[in-house]
Image (cartoon, helix red, strand yellow):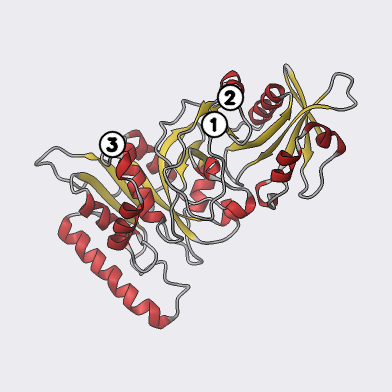
Amino acid sequence: MQSQQESPVKYLVVPFETGTSPAPLKRLGPHEVLERWHAVDRSAHGPHLVVVPDENGEGWAAAALVTARPHTAYLKIVDAVGDVSTAVAAVVAHARGLELAQVKWEGWTATPEDVAAAGFTPLRPPLAQAEEAAGPAAGHVRWLRGCAAAEPPYYGQTTHFTCGAVTALVAQAHAGTLPRDALDRRAELTLWRDATNFPACEPVGLGVAVHRAWPSSTVGIHLDTDRPVLLDHLPESEQEWRAHLQGMSRADAARAGVPIGTGRLSVTAIRNAIGRREQVLLLVSLAAMQGFDVPHWVLCHGTVPGAVVIEDPWAGAAVGDTWVDAHLLPVPDRSLDTMSAVSADPFHGAVTIGRPQPPGASPSGPADE
């Protein structure tokens, strides 16, 4: 048990173990709340209790269950029990002590009055989620470092393979190029069908599909290898025809004038692109955040000191991960750099999307800096 203090909040950090609730917590927490806390194995996301002792120091006045994806720059309050305002203030102090960028709060039991009093801002609810997704109807955020990043719509991919299409659609909705009400499953599957390498979307095919869908937007493709990618897990007979499709995508990019940069898009370059009001579709491995090495597309759209703000269209319900985690997610620069190395023989892939160009302007810009 670790005791920490940030004036005027005195709090303790206590490990949380699935299936076991300390006696002081049982006295504070309603049965249905504690039941939700133990309903899934949250161990992959560092669950712990932030506890405020009572005045005589013999019990607890308040407590909050706190989790976060590994290698990120936020904490998430699942619920707060007892003196809710004091519990939330303790979590904020805890996050400041860890020099994190943000605290989120799932809306299972949070009231609008408590949310506003604690300085949190409501998040827009998701437009869609996968059938197996399990999350609260509401979520809230408080930024601790830097200016709050502008909020894109959150859309959870509805299949296991449409992350690339979803990140592109969310980027265009965030830019105002695509109406929010057009961000739906039909749009998701339509763009995926144009971009897919069956079933994954590799960088060149995705970039070409984005250019086809929005020819006035500046598109750049970044891929630091000439070999076919995202095929290593397939038998050789399955790799051959998909590699041929990737060659066709490169020919399509050349005909359309969409540049393919052969250098790695560094985190500095990602920050610079965002500073130019571009958005970056970045291919990452989920090994650091979720514990399994699967290639996955995320959208980089904002920055705060020390971290890039992303949208992740996938959340792992089985470990208590919800859309509140995946939305407006700050990832430290160093972590993002590590995540962007994909596969056992690492390569790096990204697609940059700029603002729509006026008629007569070249739709595609330089792919490397």
Q: Position of residue 116 (x, y in %)?
A: 56, 20
Q: Quadrant of residue 78?
A: top right
**In terms of sequence position, does the residue under pointer 1 or pointer 2 come before the other?**
2
Q: Position of residue 154 (x, y in %)?
A: 43, 42
Q: Which residue is mark 1?
A: 140
Q: Quadrant of residue 208?
A: bottom left
Amino acid type indicated by mark 3:
Gly
Q: Residue at x 54, y 55 (%)?
A: 132
**In terms of sequence position, does the residue under pointer 2 or pointer 3 come before the other?**
2
Q: Secondary structure at mark 1?
A: strand
Q: Is residue 243 above or below residue 44?
A: below
How far apart marks 2 and 3 lie (CA) works out to: 29 Å
How far apart marks 1 and 2 lie (CA) works out to: 7 Å
Amino acid type indicated by mark 1:
His
Q: Residue at x 68, y 52 (%)?
A: 40
Q: Which residue is mark 3?
A: 176
* Pointers 1 and 2 in contact (C-beta within 8 Å): yes
Q: Is residue 124 above or below residue 119?
A: below
Residue 109 is marked as none
Q: Which residue is mark 2?
A: 115
Q: Secondary structure at mark 3?
A: loop
Amino acid type indicated by mark 2:
Val
| Residue 1 appears in the figure | no
**In terms of sequence position, does the residue under pointer 1 or pointer 3 come before the other?**
1
| Quadrant of the image containing the C terminus | top left
Q: Is residue 49 above or below residue 189?
A: above
Q: Residues within 10 Å of mark 3 (few under 14, many from 20)?
A: few
Q: Position of residue 221 (x, y in %)?
A: 30, 54
| Quadrant of the image containing the N terminus | top right
In the image: residue 361, left or right of residue 218? left
